[in-house]
Structure formats: C-alpha cells, structure tokens
Image (cartoon, rainbow, N blue to C red):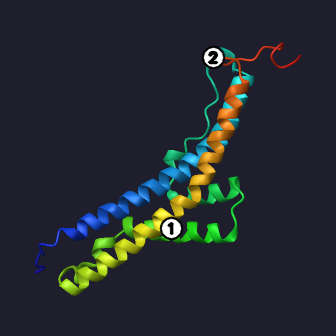
Amino acid sequence: MINLHQDDEIYAHFGVAALAAQVFEQNVALALSLRIGSDAAQHVLLRPSIGGAPHRPKDFRRLTLGPLVSKLKEAFEVDDEVAEKLAEALACRNSLMHGFFPRHARNLQKREGRALIKQELEGARELLWEATRLIAPLVVGEAERLLKFEDMVPSDGFCTKKDRGA
C-alpha cells in the first residue's frame, strides 16, 4: 500500500513547472501564428476573397508541441544553440506532462525523494522559462512586422487599385 505524504509543496512545484511548459508552448504557437498568420493577413487584406469568407491561417493551437517546434525551426532562422534549447525544452515538457508522477512514485514516499523531485521540477521550470525567453524576440519581431504592415493598409482593410498604385 502506498502511504500518502503531506508535502503539498511538490504539487505546487509541479504546477509552476506546468505553467512554464504552457507558456513555452503558447509562445511557440504565437510566433508561428504571427509569422504565418501575418502573411495570410496580408493576402486577405490585399486580395479579399469572393463572398467575404477570408482565408484563415492554419490553427497552430491544434498541433502538439513537437510539430510546433519543428515548424518554428523551419519558419525562423534559429541558431544551433537555440535549436538545442528548444529540443531540451520539448523533452522536458513531455517528461512533465506524460507520466511524471508514476515515474516518481517511490521518491514521493520519502522526504529525501521528494527533495529530489522538487529539485528536478525547479530545473524544469528554469529550462522552460529560458526557452520561452529565447522565443520572445521572435514573437516581438513578428508582432512589429505585422504592426508595420497594418499601418500601410487603409482603415477599411481593403486596398483599391488606387491604393496599390495601379
């Protein structure tokens, strides 16, 4: 029989690491949405579709993190150091979200084991935040690019031949 412990701090550490994993994943998706979405937005704004149904960019929120990270590396020029950190963050996130507690069941039973779990979760949190900080400039750069484009488009969102210089 497994004895439950009274150390709720483990779950708080897990929650903070899980939050960092979600922020990392959302930033990867946001960078991609801004990069690909802004290209699609330019297409829609410059060439509205017939019938008023605009082209929608692929919804990156439906992809799992592995394909998102792969697409991010394809869409942006990331150096080897960033690519390596993204791979580490992906592996870390997957380790957290897929079977973390079953793998640590024995360590949960002893104070020393719980201390090791907390240490691992703190390391995971730091790794995931570091990876998020590496992606942040991509998000900001794409947002700035989109905002510059928005400034060029007439306020009604549609360009006429006159607006395009035709």
Q: Image height check: is 127 above or below 39?
A: below
> Helix or strand or loop: what does disc 1 sit on?
helix
Question: Residue 98 versus residue 93: which sits nearer the camera?
Answer: 93
Give the numbered dot on residue 52.
2
* x then y, percent, for residue 126: 44, 69
Distance, label 2 to label 1, CA atoms, is: 41 Å
Q: Is residue 8 visible?
A: yes
Give the numbered dot on residue 89.
1
Query: Quick check: 123 left or right of 27?
Result: left
Amino acid at the residue labelled 1: Ala
Residue 83 appears in which quarter of the rendering? Answer: bottom right
Query: Quick check: 74 left or right of 92?
Result: right
* x then y, percent, for residue 88: 53, 72
* x then y, percent, for residue 14: 30, 66
Q: Residues within 10 Å of mark 1 (few under 14, many from 20)?
A: many
The answer to which of marks 2 and 1 sits earlier in the sequence is: 2
